[in-house]
Amino acid sequence: MAEGARILVIDDDHQIRRMLRAALSGYGYSLGEAATGKEGLNEAALFHPDLVILDLGLPDLDGMEVISRLREWTQVPIIVLSVREGETDKINGLDAGADDYLTKPFSMGELLARIRVAIRHVARNEDEPVLTFPDLAVDLARRLVLLKGEELKLTPTEYEILKALALHAGRVVTHRQLLRVVWGPNFQEETHYLRVYIGQLRRKIEEDPARPRYILTEAGVGYRFTSGE
Amino acid sequence: MANFRAPSVSLHLAPVKPYAWTFLTIVLVTLIGKLISSFFDIANVTLLYLLPVLMSAVRWGRGPSLFASFLGVLAFDFFFVPPVFSLAVSDIKYIFTFAVFLLVGLVTGTMATRIRDELEKTKQREKRTLALYALSEKIASKADLGEILATFARTVAEAVDGRVSILAGEGDHVVRELASYPASAGVGDEKQKAVVRWVLEHGQGAGRGTDILREASELIFPIKADKKTLAALCVNLDQEKRPLSMEKQQLIEAFANLAAVAIIRLRLAEEAEQVQRLAESEKLHKALLDSISHDLRTPLASITGAVTSLLAEGGSYDQEAKGILLDTIKEGAFRLNHFVANLLDMARLQSGSLKLRAEWHDIQDIVGVALREIHDVVEGHPVLVNIGPDLPLVKADFGLVEHVLINLLENAAKYAPGGSEIVVSARAAERMMLISVADRGPVIPVDEREHIFDKFHRVQRSKSISGSGLGLSICRGIVEAHGGMIWVDSPLERGNRFTFSLPLSMQGHEP
């Protein structure tokens, strides 16, 4: 499915666009390009992309506006590109409906991984009864977590957090999204709840909690569950 | 101000009051004399009349004491010397008594007056010394010229009960007000400006009560030091006709000298500081340029070298050579990115625009992200993480504390011998979380430990290792912005241990 997928790059920097075209074409993707937000919105309608890579620092439109205008009519996955200092932009972008983000400068390996996850996420939508990862399995039907085949004792909150993260494996989940799923809409700002529970969860599932294998922290944004490879 | 009004009123009555009192005491003495004259010889009564003379001499000075002498003689003659109730004298020996009495009265009166004057002068001197001392105390605690002048103006204004301003010349015709009390008495009219300019030019007092320009409405003193007139002190008395007394003028002159010394001291200190600042900023600029050109060019050189070789000879390299060249490019790019991050942090710290996004974080989480970020750089050093499971959360800016850790880890990897262990640990102390990064590198000499957190400071013998000397100063800036501290020590003289503290919350934070 990934082969031949259509990717629209919206970035005002010519060099980045050229580099992405060369690199991604090499992996079999077909590329569309736009240098401004307006152009990007047009292209999104004409090019029918399977994924949009959007730079937040555009000359004409605010990146946030591009996201919300796209979300008015399409659920196409959006990966946001931003510079390191723009943490607030990243979070706003994700909360506005973007699927993932990458900080410039980024490595091609990271970008390809994000693209794969984002596209697969759209393709795979049926409920899986068991989420399996190397050494770790989350049995959604029986509310069981198995680490290296042994059952783990998790509190209900820890289980809910792990489930929310594992369901979005490979993708970033913002603090806000996680708080909303686990505690409900009234606790969206209580990020210190999360720090405490993530710490506890890591001590249970990670071999070395300071070098986590499954639950990675995305500084200032949220958490990302990796398959642990 | 009101308490200055009262004495000026009593001064007006002063000439009359002592005479009235002297008169009353003479009346009293006469009555007493009348009472005792029936038991004693009237020669003794003469002695009684010396009492008012002495008293008025001590209390009011020469005038009243002379008055007492003459009045005493008259009263004695009139009430006691026969024929009584007449100024006529029957016996010639009383003329002699009068003469001696007058003489004694004059001499004792004069002596008592002199003692009194001495006393008065000593009191004045003491008062002036106290006033000067008070002013110098006030001025010494001020570090700013404006404050010193304001204090000075206020002190003078209170001492003379008038309006005071301190003026300085600027160019040929401009007179600028430096300070005044009460607030802004204003520069004044053209006439006053002319007097001020004259005073500034000649370094002599002028205006009311002096020899020069005495028709001016105010009195102007020069504030002089080193034979240069720094400013003019302009005293404006409310409506009052009488010019300032000599003592007041002397007091103001003494005040002016003191102010001049303070001004000079401040100017010298400022000049010295400015020279030092200039030298320091030049040094900083040079160091910054050196560092930027070095830290940008070195990775750029390796990137350019690797890329151009691949472009030119791409086909002829084997897989391993290509891998090395590509790794070089990757590492160079990482170093550039890291350097730019440090430059940005420094610029933000320096411009004061560093806004902390302080939230509750698990220190283990920050350490984990830093280790992931710097994974390639510390490769070859086993990193031991020693963080207890039950540490409280810290309120910190995640990204900035991560930068601190990255800088410390990078330093450790850079200076310590390859393969040596790096230990990251965290523990909670009273009110503070202590996070440390320890390496097995060459021990930093004790006298260098203070300075390594200064901008662009690098330990002398480490010149061969590339680096800007920015990292640690940025660490300090970030840690201090969090209300913490950073230091380095060397436990057991093996390697260096960098430790920084972050404040813990006081109240519980468990959900």
Image (spheres, helix red, strand yellow):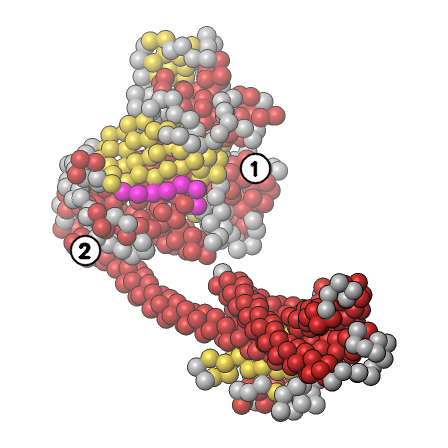
What percent of the width, then of the height, locates residue B465? 19, 52
Magenta residues, as a range? Answer: B481-488
Residue at 69% x, 87% y is: B216
Residue B388 in view in this figure: yes
Q: Residue furthest bottom?
A: B212
Q: What is the tally of numbered marks visible in this picture?
A: 2
Q: Which quadrant: the C terminus of chain A?
A: top left
Which numbered dot is residue A96? Answer: 1
Q: Amino acid at mark 1?
A: Ala
Q: Residue at x 40, y 23 (%)?
A: A199
B9 lies above or below B357? below
Q: Residue B121 shows which numbered tag?
A: none
Q: Chain of mark 2?
A: B
Determine whether the residue tagged by mark 2 lies in a helix, strand or loop.
helix
Residue A209 image point, x, y percent: 33, 24
User: Residue at 48% across / 35% down in the picture?
Assistant: B359
